Image (tube, rainbow, N blue to C red):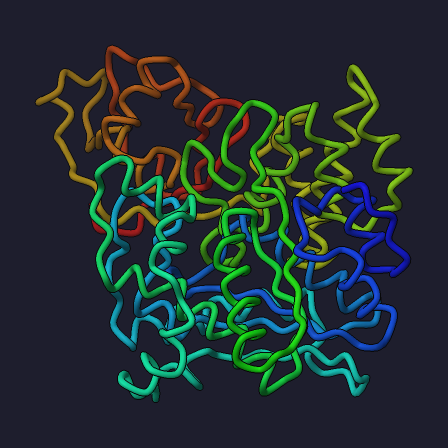
Amino acid sequence: MTYSPKSDFLNVMQARGFVADCTDYQGFDEALLAGVVPGYIGFDATAKSLHVGSLIQIMMLRWLQKTGHQPITLMGGGTTKVGDPSFRADERPLLTPDQIDDNIAGIKQVFAAYIDYDTEAPNKALMLNNAEWLDGLNYLEFLRDIGRHFSVNRMLSFESVKSRLDREQSLSFLEFNYMILQAYDFLELNRRYGCLVQFGGSDQWGNIVNGIDLTRRVLDHEIYGLTSHLLTTSDGKKMGKTADGAVWLNADMKSPYDFWQFWRNTTDADVGRFLKLYTELPVEECDRLGALGGSEINAAKIILANEVTTLLHGAEAAATAETTAREVFEKGGVGDDLPKFDLTGLNFLQGETIDAPEPGLYCAANTIFVEAKLASSGKDAKRLIAENGALIDGEPVSKDFPFVNVERLRDFTKVSAGKKRHALVKLSQPA
Protein backbone atom coordinates (compact mmCIF):
# COMPACT_ATOMS: atom_id res chain seq x y z
CA MET A 1 0.00 0.00 0.00
CA THR A 2 1.74 3.20 -1.21
CA TYR A 3 -1.21 5.55 -0.65
CA SER A 4 -0.91 7.76 2.47
CA PRO A 5 -4.37 7.76 4.09
CA LYS A 6 -5.88 10.67 5.99
CA SER A 7 -8.73 8.80 7.72
CA ASP A 8 -8.28 7.08 11.08
CA PHE A 9 -9.60 3.76 9.83
CA LEU A 10 -7.30 3.41 6.86
CA ASN A 11 -4.38 4.58 8.97
CA VAL A 12 -5.07 1.79 11.45
CA MET A 13 -5.47 -0.77 8.68
CA GLN A 14 -2.19 0.26 7.11
CA ALA A 15 -0.16 0.55 10.32
CA ARG A 16 -1.32 -2.81 11.69
CA GLY A 17 -0.78 -4.75 8.46
CA PHE A 18 -4.36 -5.63 7.50
CA VAL A 19 -4.51 -4.34 3.93
CA ALA A 20 -3.87 -6.53 0.91
CA ASP A 21 -5.66 -4.37 -1.68
CA CYS A 22 -8.35 -1.71 -2.15
CA THR A 23 -10.43 -0.90 -5.20
CA ASP A 24 -9.98 2.87 -4.74
CA TYR A 25 -7.82 4.07 -1.84
CA GLN A 26 -8.44 7.76 -2.36
CA GLY A 27 -12.17 7.47 -2.97
CA PHE A 28 -12.66 5.25 0.07
CA ASP A 29 -10.46 7.52 2.21
CA GLU A 30 -12.51 10.57 1.23
CA ALA A 31 -15.76 8.74 2.02
CA LEU A 32 -14.41 7.89 5.48
CA LEU A 33 -13.57 11.55 6.08
CA ALA A 34 -16.99 12.74 4.87
CA GLY A 35 -19.17 10.90 7.41
CA VAL A 36 -20.16 7.59 8.95
CA VAL A 37 -19.37 4.78 6.48
CA PRO A 38 -21.31 1.49 6.75
CA GLY A 39 -19.15 -1.49 5.82
CA TYR A 40 -19.88 -5.20 5.80
CA ILE A 41 -18.45 -8.67 5.79
CA GLY A 42 -20.49 -11.76 4.93
CA PHE A 43 -20.20 -14.97 6.92
CA ASP A 44 -21.70 -18.14 5.50
CA ALA A 45 -23.16 -20.50 8.08
CA THR A 46 -21.27 -23.68 7.18
CA ALA A 47 -20.51 -24.60 10.83
CA LYS A 48 -21.83 -23.73 14.31
CA SER A 49 -18.83 -21.49 14.98
CA LEU A 50 -16.36 -19.41 13.08
CA HIS A 51 -12.70 -20.25 13.60
CA VAL A 52 -9.54 -18.23 14.10
CA GLY A 53 -9.17 -17.80 10.33
CA SER A 54 -12.19 -15.43 10.45
CA LEU A 55 -10.83 -13.37 13.32
CA ILE A 56 -8.90 -10.95 11.11
CA GLN A 57 -12.19 -9.99 9.42
CA ILE A 58 -13.95 -9.53 12.76
CA MET A 59 -11.09 -7.30 13.95
CA MET A 60 -11.49 -5.17 10.81
CA LEU A 61 -15.16 -4.60 11.70
CA ARG A 62 -14.19 -3.82 15.29
CA TRP A 63 -11.69 -1.17 14.15
CA LEU A 64 -14.27 0.24 11.73
CA GLN A 65 -16.62 0.90 14.65
CA LYS A 66 -13.84 2.15 16.96
CA THR A 67 -12.93 4.78 14.35
CA GLY A 68 -16.52 6.05 14.15
CA HIS A 69 -18.05 3.99 11.34
CA GLN A 70 -20.79 1.37 11.12
CA PRO A 71 -20.03 -2.37 10.92
CA ILE A 72 -22.54 -4.72 9.34
CA THR A 73 -22.26 -8.44 9.99
CA LEU A 74 -24.12 -10.26 7.25
CA MET A 75 -25.17 -13.83 7.97
CA GLY A 76 -25.37 -15.96 4.85
CA GLY A 77 -28.74 -17.56 5.47
CA GLY A 78 -29.34 -17.43 1.72
CA THR A 79 -25.87 -17.91 0.22
CA THR A 80 -25.08 -20.88 2.49
CA LYS A 81 -27.76 -22.78 0.54
CA VAL A 82 -25.44 -22.51 -2.48
CA GLY A 83 -21.94 -22.62 -0.98
CA ASP A 84 -18.90 -20.53 -1.89
CA PRO A 85 -16.78 -22.49 -4.43
CA SER A 86 -13.78 -20.13 -4.14
CA PHE A 87 -10.52 -22.10 -4.26
CA ARG A 88 -12.24 -25.34 -3.21
CA ALA A 89 -11.51 -28.67 -4.85
CA ASP A 90 -15.10 -29.91 -4.53
CA GLU A 91 -18.64 -28.78 -3.84
CA ARG A 92 -19.65 -27.98 -0.25
CA PRO A 93 -22.21 -30.36 1.24
CA LEU A 94 -25.68 -28.83 1.08
CA LEU A 95 -27.25 -27.97 4.44
CA THR A 96 -30.94 -27.97 5.37
CA PRO A 97 -32.62 -24.69 6.41
CA ASP A 98 -32.73 -25.94 10.03
CA GLN A 99 -29.00 -26.71 10.01
CA ILE A 100 -28.28 -23.25 8.61
CA ASP A 101 -30.43 -21.58 11.29
CA ASP A 102 -28.67 -23.57 14.03
CA ASN A 103 -25.27 -22.59 12.64
CA ILE A 104 -26.25 -18.90 12.48
CA ALA A 105 -27.37 -19.02 16.12
CA GLY A 106 -23.96 -20.41 17.06
CA ILE A 107 -21.98 -17.93 14.97
CA LYS A 108 -23.84 -14.91 16.37
CA GLN A 109 -22.48 -15.62 19.88
CA VAL A 110 -19.02 -14.37 18.96
CA PHE A 111 -19.77 -10.99 17.45
CA ALA A 112 -21.11 -9.29 20.56
CA ALA A 113 -17.66 -9.70 22.16
CA TYR A 114 -16.08 -7.53 19.45
CA ILE A 115 -18.79 -5.26 18.10
CA ASP A 116 -21.40 -3.06 19.82
CA TYR A 117 -24.93 -3.70 18.56
CA ASP A 118 -26.60 -1.87 21.47
CA THR A 119 -25.10 1.62 21.32
CA GLU A 120 -27.39 4.56 20.59
CA ALA A 121 -24.63 6.18 18.51
CA PRO A 122 -25.04 6.63 14.73
CA ASN A 123 -22.50 3.85 14.17
CA LYS A 124 -24.53 1.14 15.94
CA ALA A 125 -23.62 -2.21 14.40
CA LEU A 126 -26.19 -4.14 12.37
CA MET A 127 -26.69 -7.91 12.28
CA LEU A 128 -28.42 -8.89 9.03
CA ASN A 129 -29.25 -12.06 7.11
CA ASN A 130 -29.17 -12.18 3.31
CA ALA A 131 -32.09 -14.62 3.33
CA GLU A 132 -34.09 -11.42 3.85
CA TRP A 133 -33.75 -10.60 0.15
CA LEU A 134 -32.46 -13.82 -1.44
CA ASP A 135 -35.15 -16.28 -0.30
CA GLY A 136 -37.95 -14.41 -2.05
CA LEU A 137 -36.25 -13.83 -5.40
CA ASN A 138 -38.23 -14.54 -8.55
CA TYR A 139 -35.84 -16.49 -10.79
CA LEU A 140 -36.93 -15.05 -14.14
CA GLU A 141 -36.96 -11.47 -12.83
CA PHE A 142 -33.56 -11.99 -11.26
CA LEU A 143 -32.11 -13.31 -14.53
CA ARG A 144 -33.57 -10.39 -16.47
CA ASP A 145 -32.72 -7.60 -14.02
CA ILE A 146 -29.43 -8.85 -12.54
CA GLY A 147 -28.08 -11.73 -14.62
CA ARG A 148 -27.80 -9.61 -17.76
CA HIS A 149 -25.06 -7.52 -16.10
CA PHE A 150 -22.68 -10.51 -15.76
CA SER A 151 -20.33 -11.73 -18.48
CA VAL A 152 -19.70 -15.48 -18.32
CA ASN A 153 -16.38 -14.89 -20.09
CA ARG A 154 -15.31 -12.55 -17.27
CA MET A 155 -16.61 -14.88 -14.55
CA LEU A 156 -14.57 -17.73 -16.02
CA SER A 157 -11.44 -15.59 -15.85
CA PHE A 158 -11.55 -15.18 -12.05
CA GLU A 159 -8.78 -17.13 -10.39
CA SER A 160 -11.14 -18.83 -7.93
CA VAL A 161 -13.05 -20.36 -10.88
CA LYS A 162 -10.12 -20.75 -13.27
CA SER A 163 -8.03 -22.75 -10.80
CA ARG A 164 -10.89 -25.23 -10.35
CA LEU A 165 -11.42 -25.67 -14.08
CA ASP A 166 -7.68 -25.89 -14.81
CA ARG A 167 -7.53 -28.89 -12.48
CA GLU A 168 -10.48 -30.39 -14.40
CA GLN A 169 -12.55 -30.42 -11.22
CA SER A 170 -16.29 -30.10 -11.64
CA LEU A 171 -17.94 -26.73 -10.94
CA SER A 172 -21.71 -27.06 -10.69
CA PHE A 173 -24.11 -24.45 -12.05
CA LEU A 174 -25.35 -24.03 -8.47
CA GLU A 175 -21.86 -22.98 -7.32
CA PHE A 176 -21.33 -20.81 -10.38
CA ASN A 177 -24.28 -18.70 -9.22
CA TYR A 178 -22.61 -17.94 -5.88
CA MET A 179 -20.61 -14.95 -7.13
CA ILE A 180 -23.78 -13.41 -8.61
CA LEU A 181 -25.61 -13.79 -5.29
CA GLN A 182 -22.72 -12.25 -3.34
CA ALA A 183 -22.61 -9.34 -5.76
CA TYR A 184 -26.35 -8.92 -5.30
CA ASP A 185 -25.82 -8.80 -1.52
CA PHE A 186 -23.63 -5.73 -1.92
CA LEU A 187 -26.20 -4.09 -4.19
CA GLU A 188 -29.02 -4.72 -1.68
CA LEU A 189 -26.95 -3.56 1.30
CA ASN A 190 -26.16 -0.35 -0.52
CA ARG A 191 -29.77 0.16 -1.56
CA ARG A 192 -31.29 -0.65 1.86
CA TYR A 193 -28.62 0.48 4.33
CA GLY A 194 -26.29 2.79 2.41
CA CYS A 195 -23.40 0.32 2.75
CA LEU A 196 -20.31 1.73 1.02
CA VAL A 197 -17.63 -0.94 1.46
CA GLN A 198 -17.23 -4.70 1.56
CA PHE A 199 -14.33 -6.29 3.41
CA GLY A 200 -13.01 -9.79 2.89
CA GLY A 201 -9.97 -11.95 2.48
CA SER A 202 -7.91 -11.56 -0.66
CA ASP A 203 -9.55 -14.71 -2.06
CA GLN A 204 -12.82 -12.72 -2.22
CA TRP A 205 -11.43 -10.01 -4.52
CA GLY A 206 -13.32 -11.21 -7.59
CA ASN A 207 -16.63 -11.47 -5.74
CA ILE A 208 -16.17 -8.00 -4.22
CA VAL A 209 -15.35 -6.42 -7.59
CA ASN A 210 -18.47 -8.06 -9.06
CA GLY A 211 -20.63 -6.41 -6.40
CA ILE A 212 -19.08 -3.01 -7.02
CA ASP A 213 -19.57 -3.30 -10.77
CA LEU A 214 -23.18 -4.48 -10.39
CA THR A 215 -24.07 -1.63 -8.01
CA ARG A 216 -22.59 0.94 -10.37
CA ARG A 217 -24.56 -0.48 -13.29
CA VAL A 218 -27.91 -0.78 -11.48
CA LEU A 219 -27.84 2.15 -9.02
CA ASP A 220 -25.00 4.29 -10.38
CA HIS A 221 -23.53 4.42 -6.84
CA GLU A 222 -19.82 4.55 -6.01
CA ILE A 223 -18.84 1.84 -3.52
CA TYR A 224 -15.55 0.22 -2.47
CA GLY A 225 -13.79 -2.99 -1.56
CA LEU A 226 -10.92 -3.62 0.86
CA THR A 227 -9.26 -7.01 1.27
CA SER A 228 -6.99 -8.40 3.95
CA HIS A 229 -4.16 -10.88 3.51
CA LEU A 230 -4.94 -14.58 3.74
CA LEU A 231 -2.81 -15.40 6.74
CA THR A 232 -0.43 -18.27 7.08
CA THR A 233 1.91 -18.78 9.99
CA SER A 234 5.65 -18.29 9.46
CA ASP A 235 6.03 -22.06 8.96
CA GLY A 236 3.53 -21.99 6.09
CA LYS A 237 0.48 -23.42 7.86
CA LYS A 238 -2.98 -21.98 7.25
CA MET A 239 -4.04 -19.71 10.09
CA GLY A 240 -6.59 -21.32 12.38
CA LYS A 241 -5.73 -24.92 11.54
CA THR A 242 -3.79 -27.15 13.93
CA ALA A 243 -2.89 -30.80 14.12
CA ASP A 244 -6.09 -31.50 16.08
CA GLY A 245 -8.42 -29.45 13.87
CA ALA A 246 -9.84 -25.95 13.60
CA VAL A 247 -9.41 -23.41 16.40
CA TRP A 248 -13.07 -22.54 16.94
CA LEU A 249 -14.16 -19.23 18.49
CA ASN A 250 -17.18 -20.57 20.40
CA ALA A 251 -16.27 -21.67 23.94
CA ASP A 252 -18.35 -24.86 23.70
CA MET A 253 -16.30 -25.98 20.70
CA LYS A 254 -12.87 -24.80 21.88
CA SER A 255 -12.38 -24.12 25.57
CA PRO A 256 -10.96 -20.73 26.64
CA TYR A 257 -7.91 -22.58 27.96
CA ASP A 258 -7.24 -24.33 24.64
CA PHE A 259 -7.86 -21.04 22.81
CA TRP A 260 -5.35 -19.28 25.12
CA GLN A 261 -2.87 -22.11 24.61
CA PHE A 262 -3.13 -21.80 20.82
CA TRP A 263 -1.88 -18.21 21.00
CA ARG A 264 0.71 -19.06 23.67
CA ASN A 265 2.18 -21.59 21.22
CA THR A 266 2.65 -18.98 18.47
CA THR A 267 6.02 -19.31 16.74
CA ASP A 268 8.55 -16.60 17.62
CA ALA A 269 8.51 -15.04 14.14
CA ASP A 270 4.71 -14.46 14.23
CA VAL A 271 4.40 -12.74 17.63
CA GLY A 272 4.78 -9.11 16.50
CA ARG A 273 2.54 -9.55 13.46
CA PHE A 274 -0.20 -11.29 15.45
CA LEU A 275 -0.10 -8.67 18.21
CA LYS A 276 -0.81 -5.97 15.61
CA LEU A 277 -3.62 -7.90 13.92
CA TYR A 278 -5.39 -9.52 16.85
CA THR A 279 -4.92 -7.12 19.78
CA GLU A 280 -5.36 -3.40 20.38
CA LEU A 281 -1.93 -2.81 21.90
CA PRO A 282 -0.14 0.22 20.37
CA VAL A 283 1.81 -0.63 17.22
CA GLU A 284 5.09 0.47 18.82
CA GLU A 285 4.51 -1.94 21.72
CA CYS A 286 3.67 -4.76 19.30
CA ASP A 287 6.92 -4.14 17.44
CA ARG A 288 8.89 -4.04 20.70
CA LEU A 289 7.41 -7.28 21.98
CA GLY A 290 7.83 -8.99 18.61
CA ALA A 291 11.53 -8.09 18.52
CA LEU A 292 12.31 -9.80 21.85
CA GLY A 293 14.60 -12.79 21.70
CA GLY A 294 15.49 -15.81 23.77
CA SER A 295 13.28 -16.58 26.75
CA GLU A 296 11.86 -13.03 26.71
CA ILE A 297 9.75 -13.82 23.66
CA ASN A 298 7.76 -16.25 25.83
CA ALA A 299 6.58 -13.32 27.95
CA ALA A 300 5.39 -11.65 24.74
CA LYS A 301 3.48 -14.80 23.78
CA ILE A 302 1.70 -14.77 27.14
CA ILE A 303 0.73 -11.13 26.54
CA LEU A 304 -0.57 -12.10 23.09
CA ALA A 305 -2.58 -15.01 24.51
CA ASN A 306 -4.02 -12.87 27.32
CA GLU A 307 -4.98 -9.97 25.04
CA VAL A 308 -6.67 -12.13 22.39
CA THR A 309 -8.45 -14.33 24.93
CA THR A 310 -9.66 -11.27 26.86
CA LEU A 311 -11.28 -9.83 23.73
CA LEU A 312 -13.17 -13.04 22.99
CA HIS A 313 -13.83 -14.68 26.37
CA GLY A 314 -13.18 -11.90 28.90
CA ALA A 315 -10.36 -10.95 31.27
CA GLU A 316 -11.32 -13.54 33.90
CA ALA A 317 -11.12 -16.41 31.40
CA ALA A 318 -7.72 -15.18 30.20
CA ALA A 319 -6.36 -14.91 33.76
CA THR A 320 -7.68 -18.38 34.65
CA ALA A 321 -6.11 -19.86 31.51
CA GLU A 322 -2.74 -18.31 32.35
CA THR A 323 -2.94 -19.59 35.93
CA THR A 324 -3.82 -23.08 34.72
CA ALA A 325 -0.93 -23.03 32.25
CA ARG A 326 1.50 -22.08 35.00
CA GLU A 327 0.18 -24.86 37.23
CA VAL A 328 0.47 -27.42 34.45
CA PHE A 329 3.83 -26.43 33.02
CA GLU A 330 5.78 -24.80 35.83
CA LYS A 331 4.50 -26.72 38.85
CA GLY A 332 3.48 -30.01 37.25
CA GLY A 333 -0.08 -29.63 38.55
CA VAL A 334 -3.37 -30.73 37.07
CA GLY A 335 -4.94 -27.34 36.37
CA ASP A 336 -8.63 -26.99 37.18
CA ASP A 337 -9.38 -25.02 33.99
CA LEU A 338 -8.23 -27.77 31.61
CA PRO A 339 -11.00 -29.05 29.30
CA LYS A 340 -12.89 -31.91 30.95
CA PHE A 341 -14.27 -34.99 29.18
CA ASP A 342 -16.53 -37.77 30.41
CA LEU A 343 -15.38 -41.11 29.01
CA THR A 344 -18.43 -42.90 27.63
CA GLY A 345 -17.23 -45.08 24.74
CA LEU A 346 -14.67 -47.38 26.38
CA ASN A 347 -14.57 -51.14 25.92
CA PHE A 348 -13.41 -53.05 29.00
CA LEU A 349 -11.05 -56.03 29.07
CA GLN A 350 -10.28 -58.39 31.92
CA GLY A 351 -6.66 -58.08 32.99
CA GLU A 352 -5.88 -61.78 32.51
CA THR A 353 -6.87 -61.63 28.83
CA ILE A 354 -4.18 -59.07 28.06
CA ASP A 355 -1.46 -60.28 30.44
CA ALA A 356 -1.95 -57.29 32.74
CA PRO A 357 0.48 -56.88 35.63
CA GLU A 358 -2.43 -57.03 38.10
CA PRO A 359 -6.07 -58.18 38.00
CA GLY A 360 -8.89 -55.80 37.18
CA LEU A 361 -10.64 -54.10 34.28
CA TYR A 362 -8.63 -52.32 31.61
CA CYS A 363 -9.33 -50.23 28.52
CA ALA A 364 -7.23 -49.42 25.46
CA ALA A 365 -5.33 -46.17 26.05
CA ASN A 366 -5.78 -44.95 22.47
CA THR A 367 -9.58 -44.65 22.96
CA ILE A 368 -9.04 -42.31 25.93
CA PHE A 369 -6.98 -39.92 23.83
CA VAL A 370 -9.58 -39.91 21.04
CA GLU A 371 -12.42 -39.16 23.50
CA ALA A 372 -10.32 -36.37 25.08
CA LYS A 373 -9.86 -34.88 21.60
CA LEU A 374 -6.09 -35.15 21.91
CA ALA A 375 -6.00 -37.47 18.89
CA SER A 376 -8.12 -37.34 15.76
CA SER A 377 -8.47 -41.12 15.42
CA GLY A 378 -7.41 -44.41 16.99
CA LYS A 379 -4.59 -44.61 14.46
CA ASP A 380 -3.42 -41.12 15.41
CA ALA A 381 -3.52 -42.07 19.11
CA LYS A 382 -1.51 -45.23 18.49
CA ARG A 383 1.13 -43.16 16.69
CA LEU A 384 1.21 -40.79 19.67
CA ILE A 385 1.74 -43.75 22.02
CA ALA A 386 4.47 -45.21 19.80
CA GLU A 387 6.33 -41.88 19.92
CA ASN A 388 6.02 -41.64 23.75
CA GLY A 389 3.83 -38.55 23.34
CA ALA A 390 0.75 -39.96 25.09
CA LEU A 391 0.95 -39.20 28.79
CA ILE A 392 -1.29 -40.03 31.75
CA ASP A 393 -0.51 -38.02 34.88
CA GLY A 394 2.78 -37.07 33.25
CA GLU A 395 3.92 -40.65 32.58
CA PRO A 396 4.13 -42.04 29.01
CA VAL A 397 1.72 -44.82 28.10
CA SER A 398 3.75 -47.99 27.63
CA LYS A 399 4.20 -49.05 24.02
CA ASP A 400 4.43 -52.65 25.18
CA PHE A 401 1.25 -52.49 27.28
CA PRO A 402 -0.99 -49.69 25.90
CA PHE A 403 -3.84 -50.28 28.36
CA VAL A 404 -5.07 -48.40 31.44
CA ASN A 405 -6.62 -49.79 34.61
CA VAL A 406 -10.06 -48.19 34.81
CA GLU A 407 -9.62 -47.58 38.55
CA ARG A 408 -7.28 -44.73 37.56
CA LEU A 409 -10.20 -43.08 35.76
CA ARG A 410 -12.73 -42.99 38.60
CA ASP A 411 -11.71 -39.39 39.35
CA PHE A 412 -10.51 -36.71 36.94
CA THR A 413 -7.10 -37.67 35.55
CA LYS A 414 -4.79 -35.51 33.46
CA VAL A 415 -3.96 -36.84 29.99
CA SER A 416 -1.52 -35.09 27.69
CA ALA A 417 -0.46 -35.18 24.05
CA GLY A 418 3.14 -34.02 24.26
CA LYS A 419 3.99 -31.04 26.42
CA LYS A 420 1.41 -28.56 25.14
CA ARG A 421 -2.01 -30.23 24.91
CA HIS A 422 -3.79 -31.46 28.01
CA ALA A 423 -7.23 -32.52 29.22
CA LEU A 424 -8.94 -34.00 32.27
CA VAL A 425 -10.85 -37.27 31.82
CA LYS A 426 -13.18 -39.22 34.09
CA LEU A 427 -15.01 -42.50 33.64
CA SER A 428 -18.77 -41.86 33.46
CA GLN A 429 -19.98 -45.25 32.19
CA PRO A 430 -20.52 -48.31 34.37
CA ALA A 431 -17.56 -50.62 34.61
Residue 107, position in %: x, y?
A: 49, 66
The image quarter containing residue 225 is bottom right
Query: Which of the 4 quarters of the picture holds residue 208?
Result: bottom right
Relative to 378, residue 179 above or below: below
x, y percent for residue 375: 35, 33
- Residue 75 or residue 99, whichever sits in front: 75
Q: Which residue is found at the position 22% from the left and 46% from the top?
A: 345
- Residue at 45% x, 48% y: name it: 340
Residue depicted at 30% across the width and 46% down the height = 343
270 or 249, which is in the foreground?
270
Foreground of the two, 154 or 378:
154
The residue at the point 64 percent across, 38 percent down is 263
Q: Position of residue 200 (x, y in %)?
A: 58, 56
User: 11 left or right of 239?
Assistant: right
Q: Is residue 131 above or below residue 398?
A: below
| 321 displayed left or right of 106 | right
Specify the farthest residue to the top.
400
Quarter containing the N terminus: top right
Q: Is residue 312 left or right of residue 15?
A: left
